[in-house]
Image: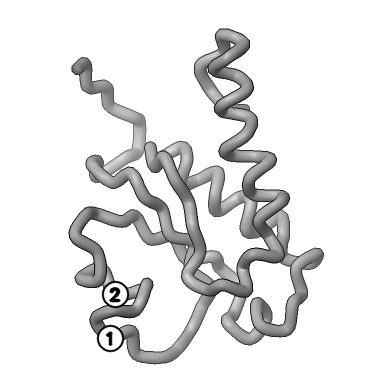
Amino acid sequence: MIYQARAGQVAYGYAIGMLCAEWHIPFIPGDLNNAGTFPFPVRYESVAGVSGADVLRGNGDSYAKIMVDAAKKLEAEGVRAITGNCGFMASFQEEGVCVCVLKKIIYRRCGRERCT
């Protein structure tokens, strides 16, 4: 395997990315937002400006771009799978999948290496 550095990246080795709405509650072991929950490294990304209450209210349209931008950041940092810290984030799934996952698979089949 050949390792390559990415400009500005300060850590490597996480294949899973977690989009995190801003919840102001304790995250005990077993919670998605507690890194000790997983037996593997997870890269957490705060979705600035999106609170847990916003996610629960279903304000999906107004926050879709912010969520997709955060997912693109995780992808640029090398994660291979992205999830969210709340099941209600499913309302952003279509936008996120179309941008980060499907494009990457399609581009690989077409000979392109990077998702734009």
Residue 87 left/right relative to 80: right
Up/down of 33 relative to 15, above or below: below
Q: Quadrant of residue 43?
A: bottom left
Determine which residue is flagged by label 1.
28
Up/down of 7 relative to 48, above or below: above
- Crowding around mark 2 (Cα neighbors within 10 Å: few <14, some 14 to 19, many 20+) is some
Disc 1 or 2, which lies upstream in sequence? 1
The residues bearing labels 1 and 2 have C-alpha atoms spaced at a distance of 6 Å
Q: Name the residue: 38% across, 37% down.
A: 78
Residue 79: which disc?
none
Task: Provide residue 83's location: percent of width, then percent of height.
Answer: 49, 58
- Crowding around mark 1 (Cα neighbors within 10 Å: few <14, some 14 to 19, many 20+) is few
Determine which residue is flagged by label 2.
34
Q: In which quadrant will I find the N terminus?
A: top left
Q: Name the residue: 57% across, 38% down.
A: 101
Q: Name the residue: 28% across, 46% down.
A: 14
